Image (spheres, rainbow, N blue to C red):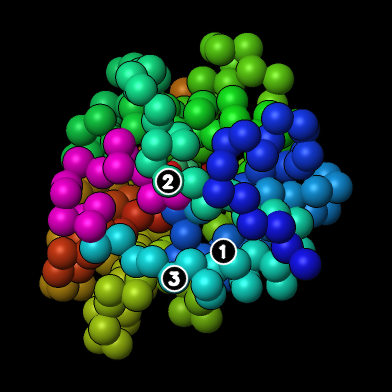
Amino acid sequence: MIEIHKSAVDFARQKYDVLVPTMGALHAGHESLIKIGKSLGTKVLVSIFVNPLQFENKNDFANYPKSIEKDVALAESAGADGVFIPNKEEIYPGKVNEVSAGALGEIYEGKSRPNHFNGVLTVVKRLFEITSPRLAVFGEKDFQQLFLIRKMVKEHGLPIGISAAPTIRDEFGLALSSRNVFLDIDQRKSAQVLFRTLKKSSIDEMKQEIKNEPNFKLDYLEIIDEESLSKADKSTQYKRGIIAGWINEVRLIDNMRVSFTS
Ligand code: PAF
């Protein structure tokens, strides 16, 4: 039986060696994070906490999908040993010591979502403090988030390994995301444009692909250096295409390794 924890005090003894932080509304992408965690460690804890600090928009926070019972069942069937479902006071008792994501937290995703990455790093650091895992698993779908978490771990000297899990896609290439539940059938079809765009072999082809999908409002499309997040140039070894935008009000992001810069 999976153990359900609601209090930070439960982690006074180091009980779990792997942490999979989530905001709930679990889907097959999370399932894969849990399975990867289980393959790398012994006892996997899944945290479920919709972190108010990382939402710049109050409605977005209030409307974030919630499905706790289903989440616990999915975590258990994926092999998790425990779930941690804290309330806000458990995570942020007293004054919040905000972690700054710095300048790299203000570009791309951070430009459209001010303070988002400060909120993400702040909650991830708190979860690490409370649960003291040896390893934590994050999805590659949130590439900038993964980069900034790794940077924080390094800069703060945290004794925690970070594992990256490949993006899980549906049969049409749409990256799984908790926000996909807000898309109707036609919008889901339009959302396939992100994957189609990332598979192109030049930036011009990418831009054309986006133009062909009028329901998608582009926020940014960049080819970046995976190792620094700066814009890629000819000398960049590992390049990644990153894309974000909206279908109606639903924000979608995706990324993929690419082999060109322009
Ligand atoms: O990727 C997410 O679901 C969240 O940003 C995270 C890492 C759980 C922090 O709230």
In the picture of the structure, the residue carrying the numbered disc 3 is 67
From this viewpoint, which residue is outermost toward the right? 42
Q: Residue at x 52, y 52 (%)?
A: 85
Tell me where residue 262 appears, x and y as whole percent: 35, 41
Tell me where residue 119 appears, x and y as whole percent: 34, 32
Q: CA distance from mark 2 to mark 3?
A: 15 Å
Q: Look at discs 1 and 3 and give the one toward the viewer.
A: 3
Out of 21 and 197, give the one closest to the viewer. Answer: 21
Does residue 8 show up?
Answer: yes
Structural crowding at the residue carrying mark 2, measured as other residues with C-alpha within 10 Å and reported as few (<14), some (14–19) or many (≥20): some
Specify the segment rendered in magenta.
Answer: 49-62
Q: Residue at x 76, y 41 (%)?
A: 16
Q: Looking at the rendering, in which quadrant would you find the N terminus?
A: bottom right
Does residue 55 belong to the magenta stretch?
Answer: yes
In the picture of the structure, the residue carrying the numbered disc 1 is 29
Out of 44 and 141, give the one closest to the viewer. Answer: 44
Check disc 2 and report its element: helix, strand or loop: loop
Disc nearer the start of the sequence (2/3): 3
Q: Which mark is residue 87?
A: 2
User: The residue under label 1 is which amino acid type?
Assistant: Gly
> Quick check: 59 above or below 102?
below
Tag 1 near tag 3, CB within 8 Å: no
Tell me where residue 107 appears, x and y as whole percent: 27, 30
Q: Look at discs 1 and 2 and give the one toward the viewer.
A: 2
> Quick check: 6 above or below 108?
below
Which quadrant contains ligand 1?
Answer: top left
User: The residue under label 3 is which amino acid type?
Assistant: Ser
Tell me where residue 206 appears, x and y as whole percent: 31, 57
